Image (cartoon, rainbow, N blue to C red):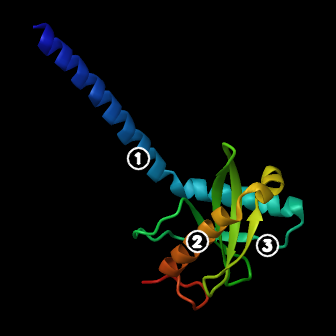
């Protein structure tokens, strides 16, 4: 009797864990558009504060293929270029960065998106940044054609 009771208790706990993971994953997926809009406003506010002339226009849809980076693609106002907003871990801290990607899918520059990122971007090893640049270029090639940022079909 106690063996079946212990097994039943373990099954209930496992059910709770699976249920919580399912709820969390559904919330994560369903709030992606809201997160992208919030990030857009935050980055534009930072650009205004820093005196940058670049403004993000709208989030671009992500390709659901094999090449997926953890970040968001945005179109840029009055430009065919795009920006990929992502974060890098440096010394246990997330550092938000933006990669300006041309319509030819080349990374033009990496922009720090916070005061802390400005201070710590120099500490990120060049090899790590090159890995991110290569991954962004690969993802841009998979997501967009060379003609003005149109999405691949």
Front of the two marks 2 and 1: 2
* Residue projecting furthest to the bottom: 147
User: Is residue 109 depicted above or below 98 in this figure?
Assistant: below
Q: Which mark is residue 54?
A: 3
Mark 2 in CB contact with mark 1 (< 8 angstroms): no
Q: Please state the horizontal and vertical placement of residue 20, each as a whole percent of the image.
A: 38, 34
Mark 2 in CB contact with mark 3 (< 8 angstroms): no
Residue placed under numbered mark 2 in the picture: 136
Q: Residue at x 65, y 55 (%)?
A: 88
Going by the image, does 63 lie left or right of 100? left
Going by the image, does 113 lie left or right of 136? right
Residue placed under numbered mark 1 in the picture: 26
Circle nearer the N terminus (2, 1): 1
Gap in angstroms between the C-alphas marked 2 and 3 = 19 Å
Give the quadrant of the C terminus: bottom left
* Residue projecting furthest to the right: 51
Q: Residue at x 20, y 14 (%)?
A: 6
Where is residue 44, by image quadrant? bottom right
Q: Residue at x 85, y 63 (%)?
A: 48
* Residue projecting furthest to the left: 1
Q: Which mark is residue 69?
A: none
Gap in angstroms between the C-alphas marked 2 and 1 = 27 Å
Front of the two marks 2 and 3: 2
Circle nearer the N terminus (2, 3): 3
Where is residue 110, by image quadrant? bottom right
Q: Please state the horizontal and vertical placement of residue 18, each as a whole percent of the image.
A: 32, 35
Gap in angstroms between the C-alphas marked 1 and 3 = 34 Å
Give the quadrant of the N terminus: top left
Q: Secondary structure at mark 3?
A: loop
Q: Please state the horizontal and vertical placement of residue 11, each as a whole percent of the image.
A: 22, 25
Q: Residue at x 55, y 70 (%)?
A: 135
């Amino acid at each position: 009797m106690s063996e079946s009771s212990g097994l039943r208790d373990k099954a209930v706990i496992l059910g709770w864990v699976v249920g919580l993971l399912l709820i969390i994953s559904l919330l994560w997926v369903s709030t992606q558009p809201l997160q992208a809009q919030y990030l857009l406003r935050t980055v534009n506010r930072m650009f205004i504060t820093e005196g940058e002339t670049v403004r993000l226009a709208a989030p671009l849809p992500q390709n659901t293929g094999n090449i997926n980076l953890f970040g968001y693609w945005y179109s840029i106002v009055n430009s065919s270029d795009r920006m990929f907003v992502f974060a890098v871990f440096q010394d246990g801290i997330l550092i938000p960065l933006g990669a300006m990607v041309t319509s030819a899918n080349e990374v033009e520059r990496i922009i720090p998106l916070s005061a802390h990122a400005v201070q710590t971007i120099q500490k990120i090893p060049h090899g790590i940044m090159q890995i991110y640049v290569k991954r962004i270029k690969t993802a841009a090639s998979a997501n967009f054609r060379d003609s003005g940022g149109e999405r691949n079909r």
